[in-house]
Image (tube, rainbow, N blue to C red):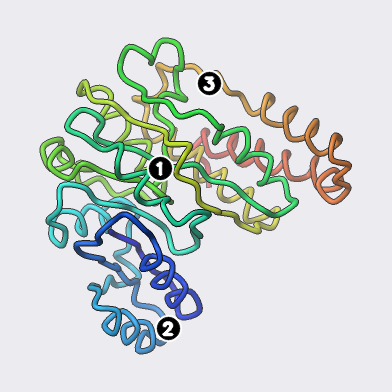
Amino acid sequence: MVCPLYLADREIGRVIRQLKAQKKIELNKVVFPITEEGDLSAVIQKIRQAGFSYFLVPKSEFSHSLTREKAIIEYCESDVVLMMSQDVRFAMDVAVYELVSTISEQTVFAYGRQISAKRSIERYTREKNYGKNSRTVTAIDVEELQLSAFFASDAFSAYHRPTFLALGGYDHVHMMMSEDMYYAKKVIDAGYGKAYVAEAVVEHAHDYSYKELYNRYRSTGKWFAEHPEFDNYKTTDSGLKLAKYVFARAVRERNIPVLLRFFPDMASRYLGMRRGRRNKP
């Protein structure tokens, strides 16, 4: 298991407890890449007490792709590697089991279902993006699914390590986001399967300000501008469809806070993505 940590002194105890509470699995090794920021002594002490491992990453060198790649290549040994982020909470005590059980020599990458208990816009976007039905995507599905064929999330995912090594991981490319989507495309292009496992459920939510949301979507747009290999695929699940779904769900549930936030929130996403795709600062 690999879980990058950043200023995690308030979360590390919960992360360790929830990992140890997972059933039907045996954790061979748990590795925490820790970004060097703040007082790390308490975090390191709890990791050592749990019998887990860690390595330090200078803040200036942290990379969502390169740091994970280093952890998988240099610190992991098992055929299956679980990937998660520190703010994920397991919604069930067999979430890890359900996810990693799908990994095989053919289905070499998988990600679980993310939900949000908050009565926020993110609750509805997660409903739309993480449905109730599992599916394995291969090359024959790309024509139908287009860009969404490569959707994945390392917030809660599993890798077949021998295939990761054989495919060259993330190709040593520095990415601060979407390394999961980058790898998913490599997996599918190479003839393997990528699974979405709806039975493996976690809670995962953020509380972004409009500025943070704008900057996040600008970074996403910039990432797509820097990776033209995705330009050949259409966006079948458009932002407009997502906006309509969120609005309809909020109206149905009479969720006034979401309705009040809806237009500036969606505008922040749209304008950020548009600016980023133009690759402007």
Alpha carbon separation for disc pair 2 and 1:
26 Å
Amino acid of disc 3: Thr
Q: Which mark is residue 178?
A: 1
Nearest to N terminus: mark 2 or mark 3: 2
Compared with 136, 159 (above or below) is below
From the top left corner, tell me how far across and down residue 203 is, in percent: 55, 53
From the top left corner, tell me how far across and down residue 258 is, in percent: 81, 47
Residue 267 placement: quadrant: top right
Amino acid of disc 1: Ser
Q: Residue furthest front?
A: 24
- Identity of the residue drawn at 69% across and 40% down: 124
Nearest to N terminus: mark 2 or mark 1: 2
Asked whether disc 2 touches disc 3, contact meaning CB atoms under 8 Å apart, the reply is no
Compared with 75, 256 (above or below) is above
Residue 207 placement: quadrant: bottom right
How crowded is the residue under tag 3: few (<14 C-alpha within 10 Å), some, or many (20+)? few
Q: Secondary structure at mark 2?
A: loop
Compared with 95, 127 (above or below) is above
- Identity of the residue drawn at 41% across and 49% down: 156
Name the foreground residue: 107 vs 171.
Answer: 107
Asked whether disc 2 touches disc 1, contact meaning CB atoms under 8 Å apart, the reply is no
Amino acid of disc 2: Gly
Nearest to N terminus: mark 3 or mark 1: 1
Alpha carbon separation for disc pair 3 and 1:
16 Å
Q: Which residue is mark 3?
A: 235
Q: Which residue is mark 2?
A: 38
Q: Secondary structure at mark 3?
A: loop
From the top left corner, tell me how far across and down residue 166 is, in percent: 10, 37
Q: Secondary structure at mark 1?
A: loop
- Identity of the residue drawn at 35% across and 71% down: 35
In the rendered image, the quadrant that contains the N terminus is bottom left
Q: Is residue 4 left or right of residue 242?
A: left
